[in-house]
Image (cartoon, rainbow, N blue to C red):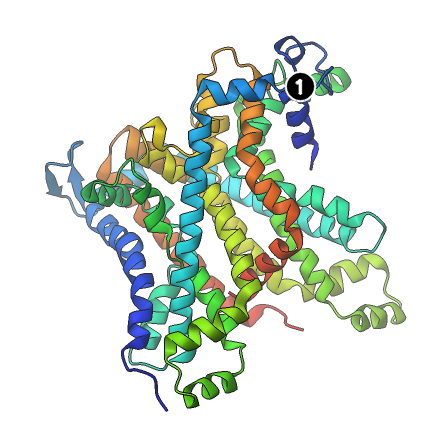
Amino acid sequence: MFLPFFLAVSMSFMSEVEVFSYPPKFLPSQINFKNYKEALDIMNLKRMLLNSFIVATCTTLGKIITGTLGAFAFSSFNFKGKNTLFFTLFITLFLPAETVMILPLFMIMSKFGWVNTYWALIIPFTASATNTFLFRQHFMSIPTELEDAAKIDGATPMQYFRKILIPLSGPMIAGASIINFVYAWNMYLWPLIVTMDNKMKTVQIGVKMLIATDSTNNWGIIMAGTLMAALPTLILFFVLQDLFVKSLVTSGLKG
Amino acid sequence: MKWGKYTPFLLLIPTFLIIILFIYWPTISSFMLSFYKVSPFGDRKIFVGFDNFINLFKSQAYLNSIKVTIIYVVITVFSVIFFGYLIALLLDNKVFGVKFYRTLIFTPYAISFTIAGALWTFMLNPVAGHINYFLDRFFGISANWLTGQPFALISIMITSIWKMLPFSIIFYLAGLQSIPEEVIESAIIDGTNNWQRIWKIKFPMLSPTTFYLIIMEITHSMFESFGIIDIMTKGGPVETTTTMIYRLYLDSFYFQKTGEAAAQSVILFLIMCFITFFYFRFGEKTVHYQ
């Protein structure tokens, strides 16, 4: 399972001669960062990494904010139309609208004048049923006595939300953040169609461009670029693996 | 004691604003567009009723994309479930170093389908790639993995399975670890062998996991796989790797067949509705809970 990464890493350090040697080599004769430098220079890969970072961070923030607020409404209040609203959200749970409805969504973006902007890459993804349900599930596991006590003390809903619910959801928020970040970082089809200007492209599109435009087909450079695109999520994963896996499983089995 | 009457609605505004603007609106507009013939620049529309749908089901290209999707989804999802379960069984023990192997095996989960496609494009490359070299060396086989006819689809499937496996393994592993030890112990006392415990006791107990995984992996392989296909084969050769989502992309943005593309969106939407309905209607009933 890990072999492709191993080969890619070793390829990324090889010189052009070594890349095309026959039989293919498994290890570079020396560690050489030339390919990484070149991959950054051929295209504006630095800018693309920055774009991906901005997009993934803002999307994550948005999903956490809308998700916790919405979840609070569903977990602590009874109101007219609750079931209808819940169901309306529920239908979208498994629907990847940015993929299935790609053309009309693109038309909406051009109506708003958002094509080629961060808005198009961020705003449509700042709310999701998955996040709302995940937090709702968690908030409902918090003892209602806390809520009653807050009410008796005369706390406003937002005070209860900020001072009690959110602090009690630390690990949940952290876990959801990682999953949302990785999801946003890895998006491909939507950024592919909604950005034309190289300055607005995300790093996933950069990987495609490296493969498509590098005329020499120097796999050392392509693999160096690909690894740089994968590095942020890989680091997140290696460092926070336990939290990552735990949140993934809770979000799935109980969502 | 009651909190404000309007508070919940205020709290829900952000979520619903986004959902309505960017999920419901495009969905409704897909339905509407699917009944029109639209000129390439979108300036003229003629109502054509169900013509777009009828044309789609008469079009060789669309029928082919359905066939490719079915082959691809069935084989990929089955493999991911089957091997995911087996690998999870292997990882579900407390041998020294198992955590290290787990990390290595989970790795493809963290990368995108696009990057998975790039890694395998390199490995399957006829010149610099390692796979052809070894196949040639040991079996005397050499194939055009990305441009040859059954091979391109096989390559796409192998890459997708590699990328999607960790997701299944993670869920099966969590499931296996939640099976109470008494269940396994009493099964051992009853004289079952290992094989029976794996398939007759553990697997049925994990049926909620299996059910969830099948649904999720179907969605992944239908939609997310776009990244792999676009990087590795671009739907070729002769459309043997053009799945329904790739067809939708081509018709929307290359051929600008707006009406037909909208009809395709509607079909995909209905498939997803069916899957969601199926999941919640039968998922809760037929699966085995401990």
Closest to the observer: A184 or A151?
A151
Q: Is residue B122 above or below residue A121?
A: above
Indicate left or right for B250 with B150 as reference. left
Label 1 Cα crowd, 10 Å radius (few <14 / some 14-19 / many 20+): many
Label total for image:
1
* Residue B172 drawn at (x, y percent): 67, 56
Residue at the spot 58% in from the left edge and 36% down from the top edge: A231
Report which quarter residue B162 is drawn in. top right
Q: Amino acid at mark 1?
A: Asn
Residue at the spot 37% in from the left edge and 48% down from the top edge: B268
Q: Quadrant of the N terminus of chain A?
A: top right
Closest to the observer: A181 or A78?
A181
Indicate left or right for A81 with B149 as reference. left
Residue at the spot 40% in from the left edge and 76% down from the top edge: A159
User: Chain letter of disc 1?
Assistant: B
Closest to the observer: A157 or B167?
A157
* Residue B138 drawn at (x, y percent): 77, 19
Please say whether residue B48 is visible from this viewpoint. yes
Report which quarter residue A48 is drawn in. top left
Indicate left or right for B273 with A114 as reference. right
The residue labelled by disc 1 is B132
* Residue A81 drawn at (x, y percent): 29, 77
Please say whether residue B75 is visible from this viewpoint. no
Indicate left or right for B116 with B235 as reference. right
* Residue B21 drawn at (x, y percent): 26, 55
Secondary structure state at the residue bearing disc 1 = helix
Q: Is residue B259 above or below residue B200?
A: above
